[in-house]
Image (spheres, coloured by chain):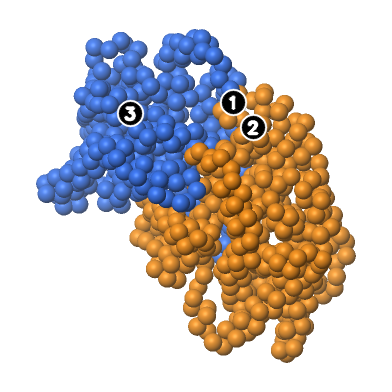
Chain colours: A blue, B orange
């Protein structure tokens, strides 16, 4: 049980670091999320080592197996971080109405498709040009595909821009992007294993992913409006509306991940379906404290994953920087192209909003590694790419969003000051 | 990362099971907490195995090390459960004012002392009578000492009796009980290791534990009233009051456990200190959603620890039942004796409220095991005792609390119906 106490200490350090970092950055007139990520880098296992390094209690718990202790601790922190990002996207979903997403639906689809094709073609071409085998090149292209929308969603919320047209396009595109990423992975890993395209399997995955998104996204809101009050009114447990909402969040996150989609897509769809009844049942106000408690864990743990030693390996560093450059440029350009006709700033917001790559790329890289088509140094390259796109997107987005932030502040100043 | 998805699935199952179990028991006019514990037994690794049994993803994560995977998963679930019980006692603290505790302070101290002496003497005597060596007998006596107040606090809250005199005596006694338990452990394990009483060390631990409790309990509320508004008003982070409150909760829980006290004692003291400003900053309303989300994990995981196979080992079962009988009788009688002069029902409520033993006894048993003064079968005996006192206390308490519950319902019916 003392191992649990050690974990408790880590959670305390993470929570304090998140809030101190967030406060510091708010005072610098920057969004809190940047402070939380930087706090994570500082206290992480590769810097100060305040978190992620098992102490004696955890070593005892794992019978002095150093590797198992480190992995066990990482499992705890990553699990709570995942819960945090699920709550974040659930919350963003609660603030999003299907009708608003549908209004920009075609744009979102366009942004997603171009933002997937660009990095895939760019990444594959770069690797082929550098003389890598074709299968390995295609895997690297696939690694560059999937956007991780958590970072962008948090920045948009921090600056109060979640209800902007750009935000809606990004959120819709993130859902499509996730489906496309899953298809790419299915196709590419199928070819790598079987040597040929498995049409039946790919069609099945496509149908499943599209079906889930269409049914939950399209009918979810209707079903909630019809059945949520009936269910909730009949339950005797305390806080039945919040409990049912959280149960739906966890359920759809799990179903999404069972299909192969990101859990956060399920959580986002759950939130969006509940947006219909959120006001009536105060879901928003009730989700906020859970947000304040759990979401910071995601960003600190994300920062703590940053391993500066990877930037010291000069032999792979140049490749990593080249791949990152391609990843940023092709995603931003492709996604921005999907909003052609918009003001240049809006195009840039959408473009850079889609840039952060998260764990999906790393999952693909590790599958490639286990299939033997990707070499180990390329895994480090994928990690560096994921770190850099995560770290540098928030400041760029904030810079691009300045006029919108200023406008929001003017609007806010015009209102009656709200209470606590 | 797919290991995280597997953990997410476990969390979903736990949450759903907790709420279904809770709802079921509410419909049977029983407190939700009993349903949550029973749900945990059902889905636990020793019954249906829906939780606590690592699947392929977790096995992969731990390189096919079955033991490490099981321990890693258990670490995640136990950590989140611990967070749950910390939130529970924090919340109970928010509903408790120091003045109310002080008014029954002498009674609480009496209840704690008699409730510690009884089981220690009774347990030691039983083992000596059965022919066990004296050191081993003393260890078993020590195992029976420490009350784990989480179960009782939840039952009292579920039935709306947290503000009764009995509840306050129990809560105060739980704090003293924890200090006494720590002292007993320090003394006994000191004697076991060094062969003699280490007076200096024992005095140091006593001073530390008493000092922490007195300073936080006594001056905490004053300090909060003076400094909390100053700090909170200067912070720019969202939900600053809640954030500072949660930070204090985690900090005091960690400090308490660093001293050797239970983390929940620190969390309770944090909540009590904040009770002064809870209304002004809506801490109570904001803590409720976190309570609804996290607390059930503690009770389901508590249930999931129950291993029915232990009851099939007939050679230790009789000893286990005898020890449990002594544990229940001596604690209930001792604690009840501390409220002599009260109505018999009140004495019984306080007595049985102190009966549940949690992980502290198991920690002591495992220390005895590692020191070589306790034999392995006696560890199973301690586990059975902990399980039985946890399982059977809630229904007994509910039965004893019936008149109070009925009175609360009459009061409630007389009020204007409150909204959501």
Per the model, the C-alpha gap separating discs 1 and 2 is 8 Å
State the residue in front, B390 or A15: B390
* Disc 3 target residue: A97
Answer left or right for B289 relative to B256: left
Residue tagged by mark 1?
A420
The N terminus of chain A sits in image quarter:
bottom right
Query: Does residue A332 lie above or below A47 as drawn?
Result: above
Decide: is A95 above or below B218: above
Is residue A60 among what the camera can see? Answer: no
> Residue B319, image x and y in percent?
63, 84
In the displayed orientation, state which residue is furthest to the front: B414
Inspect this view and state whether residue B169 appears. yes
Nearest to N terminus: mark 1 or mark 3: 3
Q: Regarding mark 3 in the picture, which secondary structure is present there?
A: loop
Q: Quadrant of residue B6?
A: bottom left
Give the numbered dot on residue B281.
2
Task: Verify CB contact (< 8 Å) between mark 1 and mark 3.
Answer: no
Mark 1 and mark 2 residues within 8 Å of each other at the beta carbon: yes
**For the residues marked 1 and 3, what is the alpha-carbon distance in whole angstroms?**
26 Å
Within the image, what quadrant is residue A168 found in? top left
Name the element at disc 2.
loop
Q: Is residue B210 left or right of residue B409?
A: right
Residue depicted at x 80% and y 54%: B104
Name which residue lies at 28% across and 19% down.
Answer: A336
Q: Quadrant of residue B201?
A: bottom right
> Label 2 near label 3: C-beta < 8 Å?
no
**Label 1: which secondary element:** loop
Q: Chain of mark 2?
A: B
**What is the count of numbered marks?**
3
- 10 Å crowding of disc 2: few (<14), some (14-19), many (20+): some
The residue closer to the viewer here, B77 or B86, is: B86
């Amino acid at each position: 049980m003392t191992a649990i106490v050690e974990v408790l200490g880590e959670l305390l350090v993470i929570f304090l670091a998140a809030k101190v970092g967030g406060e510091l950055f708010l005072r610098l007139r920057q969004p809190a999320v940047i402070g939380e990520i930087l706090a994570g880098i500082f206290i992480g296992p590769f810097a100060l080592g305040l978190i992620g390094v098992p102490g004696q209690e955890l070593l005892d718990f794992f019978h002095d197996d150093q590797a198992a202790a480190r992995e066990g601790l990482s499992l705890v922190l990553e699990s709570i971080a995942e819960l945090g990002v699920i709550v974040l996207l659930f919350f963003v979903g609660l603030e999003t109405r299907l009708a608003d997403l549908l209004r920009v639906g075609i744009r979102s689809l366009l942004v997603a498709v171009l933002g997937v094709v660009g990095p895939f073609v760019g990444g594959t071409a770069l690797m082929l040009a550098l003389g890598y085998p074709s299968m390995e090149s295609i895997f690297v292209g696939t690694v560059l595909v999937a956007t991780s929308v958590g970072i962008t969603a948090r920045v948009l919320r921090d600056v109060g821009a979640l209800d902007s047209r750009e935000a809606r396009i990004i959120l819709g595109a993130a859902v499509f992007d996730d489906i496309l990423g899953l298809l790419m992975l299915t196709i590419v890993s199928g070819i790598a294993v079987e040597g040929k395209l498995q049409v039946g399997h790919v069609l099945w995955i496509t149908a499943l992913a599209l079906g889930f998104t269409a049914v939950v996204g399209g009918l979810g809101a209707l079903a909630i409006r019809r059945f949520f009050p009936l269910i909730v009114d009949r339950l005797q447990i305390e806080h039945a509306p919040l409990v049912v909402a959280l149960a739906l969040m966890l359920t759809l996150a799990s179903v999404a991940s069972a299909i192969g989609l990101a859990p956060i897509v399920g959580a986002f769809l759950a939130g969006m379906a509940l947006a219909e009844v959120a006001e009536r049942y105060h879901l928003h106000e009730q989700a906020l404290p859970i947000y304040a408690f759990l979401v910071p864990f995601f960003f600190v743990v994300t920062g703590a994953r940053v391993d500066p030693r990877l930037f010291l390996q000069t032999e792979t560093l140049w490749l990593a920087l080249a791949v990152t450059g391609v990843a940023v440029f092709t995603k931003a350009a492709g996604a921005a192209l999907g909003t052609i006709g918009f003001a240049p700033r809006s195009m840039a917001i959408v473009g850079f909003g889609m840039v952060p790559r998260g764990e999906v790329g790393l999952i693909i890289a590790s599958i490639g590694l286990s299939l033997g088509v990707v070499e180990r140094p390329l895994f480090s390259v994928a990690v560096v790419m994921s770190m850099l796109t995560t770290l540098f997107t928030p400041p760029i987005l904030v810079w691009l969003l300045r006029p919108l932030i200023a406008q929001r502040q003017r609007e806010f100043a015009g209102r009656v000051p709200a209470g606590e």
